[in-house]
Image (cartoon, rainbow, N blue to C red):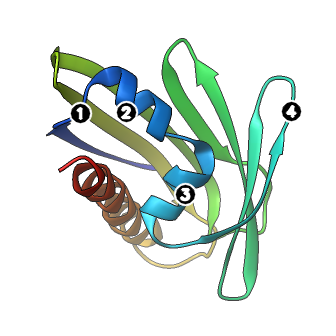
Amino acid sequence: MREVSVSRVVGVSPAELSSWLGPARIVEAEGSFAVESVYDGDDATVVVASGPGLQLPLRFEDREGTIYYTQESEGGPFAEMETWLESEPVDDERTRVTVRSAVELAAPLPFGDRIAGWKRRGELRNLLEAIDAEFD
């Protein structure tokens, strides 16, 4: 598995950011998949995302203020993928957002996990850029 992390201070209060960060919005902001459907369960929300030739269920949980999500089943681009999104106030009007993800590519390619990490880092940067643009 390859772990990647990105962080940025954004010009939004923690409360405003929290209300914006819904599972479907996170998936859309990452930029690789479209949201097909969203299912709310007792302890998690499942977002079914789609891309060229595949569907990918992503399971979102709130873990003590951290948004945690993972690829729920096999068949996606990753053998495994899990992500943690954390935020902490910098002051009343700014929040530091840190997103960390661990990925393992499903295809047996040389340097596959490195490629998966590179791709995932780009998606996480897209998410931070979308947050920044929303509250700019």
- Left or right of 67? Residue 131 is left
Up/down of 93 relative to 84, above or below: above
**Comparing marks 4 and 2, which lies closer to the viewer?**
2
- SS at badge 3: helix
Residue contact between numbered discs 2 and 1, judged by CB atoms under 8 Å:
yes
Q: Is residue 1 visible?
A: no
- Most extreme residue toward the bottom is 52
Q: CA distance from mark 3 to mark 1?
A: 20 Å
Give percent across and percent down for residue 86.
38, 27
What residue appears at the point 16 percent right and 37 percent down from the top-left corner? 11
* Disc 2 target residue: 17
Q: CA distance from mark 3 to mark 4?
A: 18 Å
In the rendered image, which residue does mark 1 sit on? 12
Evaluate whether residue 51 shows in this view.
yes
Kind of residue indicated by mark 2: Leu
The residue singled out by tag 3 in the image is 27
Distance from disc 2 to disc 1, alpha carbons, whole Å, reads: 6 Å
Q: Are marks 4 and 2 in contact (CB under 8 Å)?
A: no
In the image, residue 8 above or below residue 106: above
Tell me the distance, in whole angstroms, between the alpha carbons under discs 4 and 2: 23 Å
Q: Quadrant of residue 130?
A: bottom left
Query: Mark 4 = which residue?
Result: 41
- Tell me the crowding category of disc 3: few under 14, some 14 to 19, or many 20 or more residues within 10 angstroms, Cα based: many
Badge 3 vs badge 4, beta-carbon distance below 8 Å:
no
Helix, strand, or loop for circle 2?
Answer: helix
Residue 45, compared with residue 51, is above or below; it is above
Which element type, helix, strand or loop, lies under badge 4? loop
Confirm or deny contact between disc 3 and disc 1 (CB under 8 A).
no
Judge by depth and name the residue closer to the eye, 48 or 101: 48
Mark 2 and mark 1 lie on one chain; the one further toward the N terminus is 1
